[in-house]
Image (spheres, helix red, strand yellow):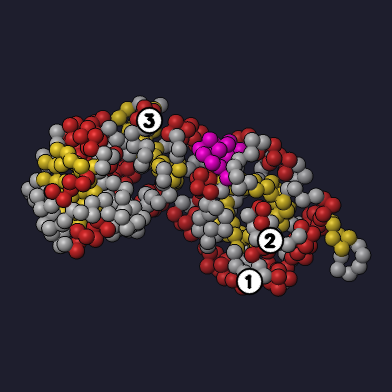
Amino acid sequence: MLCLTLTGSTLEENRLQIERNRPWISLAELRLDCLSEAEQAKAATFPDSVDLPLILTHRRKSDGGKATVGEKDRLQTLFDASRGKWAYVDIEGDVKKSDLKFKAADGDKRIDLEADLKARGIRIIRSYHDFEGVPADIYGRISRLAAKGDIPKVAVTPQNLMDLITLFRIEAELSSIEEKIIVGMGMWGIPSRILYRRTGSMLSFCSDGEAAPGQLTARTMSELYRADQIDEKTHIYAIIGNPVYHTASPKIHNPGFAAIRYNAVYVPFLVDRVRTFFKIAEMLQIRGFSVTVPHKRSVQPYLGRITREVKQIGSCNTVVRIKGMWKGINTDYYGFLAPIADRISDGTIKSALIIGAGGAARAVAWALHNHGVKFTIVNRSQDAARILAEQTMSSYDTLENAPRYSGSVDLVVQTTTVGMNSDADPVPSYRFTGKEIAYELIYEPRQTTFLSRAKAAGCPTIDGTQMLMEQGKLQFEAFSGYHFPHWITVTL
């Protein structure tokens, strides 16, 4: 189930949020703490206005909510609203039983909220939130929350991949607890939100805005990742990097898998240590993954086989599982060449300037070298440029000297991350003449300052989405064994 966390300040706003997201969700969570006092007083009627099951929550500020009133008043508001036809009511695990007895509206009789909810067939969720990390006793906490027959919910904040492993182990460690809700918050927790069934969670939360750290939209969860359709037979693929959530690669692979009806999902993983990711890969039986900055070289010691391109370039951007081992591939090499291959063949491109000397630059340098294009590498670190130049039998220079090459090359390739999500320019002093081709490897934003300057000078330009798409198609074939479906349109 995908559960939409409602963040409107009025019941009508929340009803409209449900209406907008109805195609992708199975239930919704009404947050009393987001409502005004007047709207809270009417909340018991809300279930009558929508056509799906609802969770009722009144979240304290310490648990990531907005409720700032005293605890007695908060629980009274929760009790008053609970008179409606809810499917679930969320009560924090540290709330004492004695605090859940309320005076009835028609007399001195006191009503036990827990007993009343159970008598009306409303399930109780017992929740625990940790915005600092993952507690060492998380398995014990879940067991204690479930001890009374309630549904345990833990929303914790992984700080690294080892914490994420802890969440994915919950399914095996606590398989006897059939109904539970596991939430990994923050950037490290996003894979557990998408692959929530692999943690043993009965649902995953989503929202129009980010109601909790790391939440994705309902449409993204359902249409892009098909999170609510993942089952035990779903093949998992990934992309690893740091940073990684800017990547557009899921928009290539997931629609591709859906188009050929391949039961698979492609998920981004923020990775601090490659070695730890390989542990997750074994645990989740990940069948292949893309590799981006800064791990294109650090994955190689863990590979049983590598292709000629990986050996030559020293950079791996694709890893696939083959008979008992991992195989490394480099699709950047061919992806880079695809948009310019004809112009190299017909002699339009005979010389080039490469900006940068990192992993992407290595693929570019070897591709140009192997196709007879002479080039110079300019880089902030002259030593890195020198090493790559010596390996590829090319020239090198400092980044400051890039203006010297204005008008003397047919192609300028920008391989650094400078300009990614900013207006920075890696070579502001380079003067475009209008004759050279400007090739930008960054795809977000699509028009960098580097490309905009080149276009203003009249240069033919190639943006990073072309290389991304071409190398992605090759990865898709390596992952699935099928050609990328030509009949679908990918929007990057």
- Residue picked out by circle 1: 10
Determine if residue 71 is in view. Answer: yes
Residue 451 appears at what percent x and percent y?
A: 24, 57
**Viewer-side residue, 28 vs 76:** 76
Using the image, determine if residue 259 lies above or below residue 39: above
Between marks 1 and 3, how big is the CA–CA gap?
53 Å
The span shown in magenta is 157-170
Using the image, determine if residue 84 lies above or below residue 199: below
Dot 2: what SS?
A: loop
Q: Earlier in the sequence, mark 3 or mark 2?
A: 2
Q: Amino acid at mark 2?
A: Ala
Callout in the foreground (2, 1): 2
Q: Is residue 236 left or right of residue 437?
A: right
Dot 1: what SS?
A: loop
Q: Quadrant of the C terminus?
A: bottom left
For the point 14% across and 42% down, which residue is it?
Answer: 375
Dot 3 alpha-carbon crowd within 10 angstroms: few under 14, some 14 to 19, many 20 or more:
some
Q: Earlier in the sequence, mark 1 or mark 3?
A: 1
Dot 3: what SS?
A: strand
Callout in the foreground (1, 3): 1
Determine if residue 463 is in view. Answer: no
Q: Earlier in the sequence, mark 2 or mark 1?
A: 1
Between marks 2 and 1, how big is the CA–CA gap?
15 Å
